[in-house]
Amino acid sequence: MLFAVAAAVATADLVHKALAISERGGAVLTHDRSALYVAGLAAAALVWAGAIALVKSTSIALTGGMVLGGAVGNIASLLLWPSLPGVPDPIMAGGIAFNLADVAAVLGLVFLVPTIVVFARRNRERLFEPV
């Protein structure tokens, strides 16, 4: 479930970015990211995926997949469009540029917090099991 949601989010984000780039002739706003940032994000995404897989919760996998898909979409953007000076941000609202990956990551985190609380309340006995 985690990887299916992440793949769907990353795919939607990359298709949206590709369409925006082709329509605007590559003239899209970007946010620059250093190689260290990208490496850190990739490492965090791997740890995130492993932790969620250990929990074995479908609801956490759904919301966690949104966050993971956002990370994958932004990392893949740097690889797919190396000629751009950063991650494409084709959406503008209120003077802020962002992309679908950013939206998915934020919404995933917003939904993840209550999902974790509900999971913890329903599975109190599992909270004290050794890992």
Image (tube, rainbow, N blue to C red):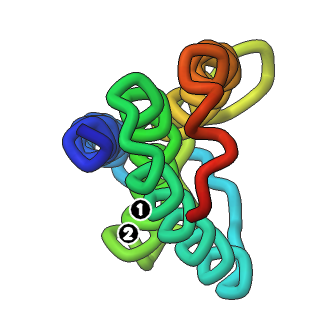
User: Of residues 40 and 32, which is closer to you in this image?
Assistant: 40
Q: Which residue is mark 1?
A: 77
Q: Which residue is mark 2?
A: 81
Indicate which disc residue 114 carries.
Answer: none
Label 2 CA crowd tier, 10 Å (few <14, some 14–19, many 20+): some
57, above or below 122, in the image: below
User: Of residues 102 and 92, which is closer to you in this image?
Assistant: 102
109, above or below 43, in the image: above
Q: Is residue 85 left or right of residue 54?
A: right
Label 1, secondary structure: give it: helix
Q: Disc 2 versus disc 1: distance between alpha carbons?
A: 6 Å
Q: Is residue 40 left or right of residue 10?
A: right
For badge 2, the amino acid type reads Trp
Where, by quadrant of the figure, is residue 97 drawn?
top right
Say which of marks 2 and 1 sits in front. 1
Q: Which residue is located at x 55 percent, y 58 percent?
A: 48
Q: Is residue 94 visible?
A: yes
For badge 1, the amino acid type reads Ser
Q: Which residue is located at x 28 percent, y 36 percent?
A: 5
Quadrant holding the N terminus: top left
Label 2, secondary structure: give it: loop
14, above or below 43, in the image: above
User: Of residues 37 and 49, which is closer to you in this image?
Assistant: 49
Residue 100, given in percent of the width and then of the height, sits at 46, 32
Residue 75, given in percent of the width and then of the height, sits at 47, 66
Q: How many numbered badges does the structure rendering display? A: 2
Q: Is residue 23 visible?
A: no
